[in-house]
Image (tube, rainbow, N blue to C red):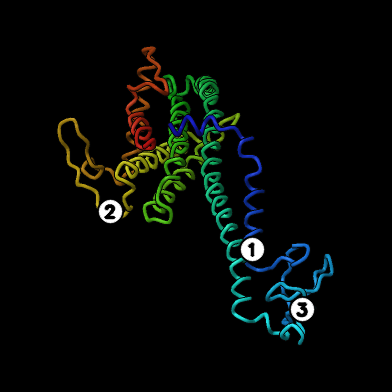
Amino acid sequence: MWLAEVTEMRPQELAGVSEAYEDAANCLWLLSNAKPCANCKSPIQKNEGCNHMQCAKCKYDFCWICLEEWKKHSSSTGGYYRCTRYEVINQVEEQNKDMTVEAEKKHKGFQELDRFMHYYTRFKNHEHSYQLEQRLLKTAKDKMEQLSRALSGRDGGPPDTTFIEDAVLELLKTRSILKCSYPYGFFLEIKSTKKEIFELMQTDLEMVTEDLAQKVNRPYLRTPRHKIIRAACLVQQKRQEFLASVARGVAPSDSPEAPRRSFGGGTWDWEYLGFASPEEYAEFQYRRRHRDRQQRRQRGDIPHLDDPSDSTLADTQEMGGGLTD
C-alpha cells in the first residue's frame, strides 16, 4: 500500500537528491553549450568567432569544429577548412549526440525524482502538523475549562465552550485529507485540466486550514468565538467541496450540479430552507452539531475523533477510500 511505503521512507534515503538533480542539470547544460577539451576533457564554452581554441587549463590548441589538434590544420594536411567536410562533422556530431542522449536520460530521471520529492515533502509536512495538532485536543479541553470558569454565572447557565474542541477536531480531519491528497495528486495526469482544478482546490483548502490553525494554536485565545466558529465552518465547507470533487473525478467547478430536492432521509438545498447563502446554511449546521455534542457531553457521552457516530467523519472515510486507489 502506498501510504505504508511512503510513511516508512527514511529521510536519509533521499539525502543528496537536490544536489544530484543540480549536477544532472549542469551536465546537460554543458553538453548543450560547451565542448570538452580534446586533451584534458575540461568543458570549454566558445565566446569568439574563431575556431582556433586554446584550453585555459592545459593550454592545448585544437579546432572547435573537429576537436583535432590545431597544428593539423595546415596546407600540408588539406587546409584549414578540411574539418568542415561532412564525414568529419558527422563523426563529431554522433559523439556529441550519444553524450547528450545519456545526459538527457539522467536529467529526466532526476526530474521525476525531484517531482516525487515535491509531493513527498508536503505529505510529510501535513503528517507532522497532524501529529502536533493532536496535542491540541488536550489543550483545547483546558482552554474550555478556563473559558467556562471565566464566563460562568454571566448568563445564568453554563457557557457553550465546545466550539474550541470542535474546531480542533475539524482541523485534524482536514489535515488527514490534505496529507492523503498529495499522493493522490502525484498520480494525476501531468498538465491536465483535472490536475489543475485539483491543485487549485487543494491550495484553497490549505489556505483556510492554515487560517484556522493560527486561530486555535495559541497559548491563549485571542480570536473571538464567532470568528473561530466561522473559520471552522469554512474549513468544513471547503473540505466537503474538495471531497465531492474527488469523488466526481475532479469535475470542473463550473459543472452544473444535479438538482436536489427534499425527500425522506435526504437533504435540502439551502435556498429551500430560507438561508441567504450556502455559508450561512453550513454555519447553521455547524452550530446544530455544537448543541448535539454539548447534550451528549452533559450525558457523559463525549465524542471522539474516530467515532463513526459523528456524521462529519463519513466524508473522511470516503476520502481514505477515494485517495488510495
Question: In the image as oriented, which residue stretches furthest toward the left?
Answer: 264
Q: Give me the residue at 82% from left, 70% from top.
A: 60
Q: Camera-side residue: 10 or 80?
A: 80
Question: Which of marks 2 and 1 precedes in the sequence?
Answer: 1
What is the three-letter code of the residue carrying label 3? Lys
Give the camera-side residue of 100 and 71.
71
User: Which amino acid is tagged 2?
Assistant: Ser
Q: Quadrant of residue 150?
A: top right
The image shows residue 17, relative to residue 25, as above or below, that is above
Q: Is residue 47 above or below residue 6?
A: below
Give how far across and how far down residue 16 sits, in percent. 66, 43
* Mark 1: secondary structure: helix
Q: Nearer the viewer, mark 1 or mark 2?
A: 1
**Pointer 3 with pointer 1, Cβ within 8 A:** no
How far apart are labels 2 and 3 at the CA level? 71 Å
**Precedes in sequence: disc 3 or disc 1:** 1
**Gap between marks 3 and 1, in whole Å?**
30 Å
Query: Which residue is rendered at x = 62% and y = 81% of the image?
Result: 85
Residue 29 badge: 1
Give the residue pinned by disc 3. Answer: 72
Expressed as whole percent of the image width and height from the top left, the position of residue 174 reads 44, 35
Q: Which residue is mark 2?
A: 255
Residue 83 rendering spot, x and y as whole percentages? 67, 80
Mark 2 secondary-structure assignment: loop
**Distance from the alpha carbon under mark 1 to that under mark 2:** 44 Å
Check the image and name the residue furthest to the front: 76
Q: Viewer-nearest of labels 3 and 1?
A: 3
Neighbourhood count class around disc 1 (C-alpha, 10 Å): few under 14, some 14–19, many 20 upward: some
The residue depicted at 80 percent of the width and 78 percent of the height is 71
* CA neighbours of label 2 inside 10 A, class few (<14), some (14 to 19), many (20+): few
Whichever of labels 2 and 3 marks the residue nearer the N terminus, that label is: 3
